[in-house]
Image (cartoon, rainbow, N blue to C red):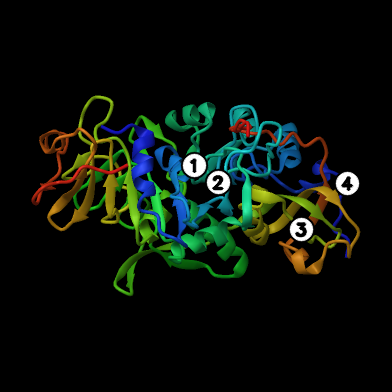
Amino acid sequence: MLDKKGIAQRIAQELQDGWYVNLGIGIPTLVANYVPEGLSVEFQSENGILGMGPFPYEGEEDADMINAGKQTVTLLPGASIFDSATSFAMIRGGHIQLTVLGAMEVADNGDIANWKIPGKMVKGMGGAMDLVASAENIIVAMMHTNKRGQSKLLRQCSLPLTGVKCVKRVVTNLAVMDITPQGFKLIERAPGVSVDEIKSATEGRLVIEGDIPEMQL
Amino acid sequence: MNKLVKNAAEAIEGIQDGMTLMLGGFGLCGIPENCIAALAEQGISGLTCISNNAGVDDFGLGLLLQKRQIRKMISSYVGENAEFERQMLSGELEVDLVPQGSLAARCYMAGAGVPAFFTPAGYGTEVAEGKEVRYFNGKPHILETALEADFAIVKAWKGDRFGNLVYKGSARNFNPAMAMAGKITIAEVEEIVEPGELDPNFIHTPGVFVQRIFEGTNYEKRIEQRTVRQKTQS
């Protein structure tokens, strides 16, 4: 089974040279720590940064340089700054090659819910709806089950949707799955996790074809 | 051309109860601290505030929420403010949550004279309820309208008396689009410079969009999430 860092590490294997990538808050943010050596990718922060770097050294924090999670960050050589309208023009216009975001629920048709629990948590969608409606390549990073042990991979989302039929791939602590017309297609198992364990933790339709390899981290 | 006013109190003259304001900033980054303080001091109420976020409990728009000066918020993310959540769940505060990109575009389009536009963001979700859907290139889009404001209040790094503005770092965020959208746009800046000092090639907001400008004081620039890394020995 993977921890959150492991999920990020596995997603980092999806990165390709020259890509512009938007990482959401939470597990997705960790992907930046595992960029394979020799690859050149630029991270976009939707509040207006391309070429975001690591956190600043202590004492070098700048209140005017934050990421979308409101954390202090730095810029890498070649970075650029722009306003919110331009930032979402980049996103909506399809100029960002990969979006990685977290989710509360994903349905086996690619629907995603991650912004609202009616009556309980209403923080807003931020940029998530623009991202999922526009990006060609959307990977969800999340735990396979919620805190009560219930599957987050469903036949149909129960929470208000963020986007419809948009997720392409899901990477959890148990597995890598692609969204296909037949449902979640199992691609890889996390180290030490059996197909049966994945089956019992998945409520949505799961497609299993042949031997399922274990992830190589 | 002289748009210079003395201070925040003079800049917000004419803002009345029940008006609609746009306020720049992302989180607490790039917010018009001086004007928010002046609005709190004068107790102008019943406001509709268009702002990406709602501040934190004791800073930013949280200061106006504390004093119940805001009737309605139009935002994309409001997660950092307990008082906000309380007022929203109790029904005291009306809240319209808008996808962040649509929010930015709705400000920009208002300033650009485009009354409505189609976007894919929000299709198939609660956001699309009651909105016209049209297909372009085989993909569904929803109709969003431009957002207008009686006053837009933005924060820049430097500016001149012509109203030309330059922002610093990620404090730019919503400020340029909102500067375009106000019927009256107020800019507060950290430093007023002489006309000509700002390189015309690098001006972010041309002065035409700004009606009033002043040099703010005592910027706190609070950091919401101070994150650092340790220096590694090498």
User: In the image, which disc is placed on residue B6?
Assistant: 4
C-alpha span from label 1 to label 4: 33 Å
In this view, B185 is above or below A101: below
Residue flagged by tag 1: what amino acid is it?
A: Tyr
| Closer-to-camera residue (B161/A190) | A190
Residue flagged by tag 4: what amino acid is it?
A: Lys
The residue sitting at the left extreme is A210
Residue flagged by tag 3: what amino acid is it?
A: Leu
Q: Nearer the viewer, mark 2 or mark 3?
A: 3
Q: Looking at the image, is mark 3 or mark 1 earlier in the sequence?
A: 1
C-alpha span from label 2 to label 3: 20 Å
Labelled pair 1, 4 in contact (Cβ < 8 Å):
no
Residue that appears at 55% across and 41% down = B53
**Dot 1 corresponds to which residue?**
B77
Q: Looking at the image, is mark 2 or mark 4 earlier in the sequence?
A: 4
Labelled pair 2, 1 in contact (Cβ < 8 Å):
yes
C-alpha span from label 3 to label 1: 26 Å
- On the question of residue B147 being in view, the answer is no
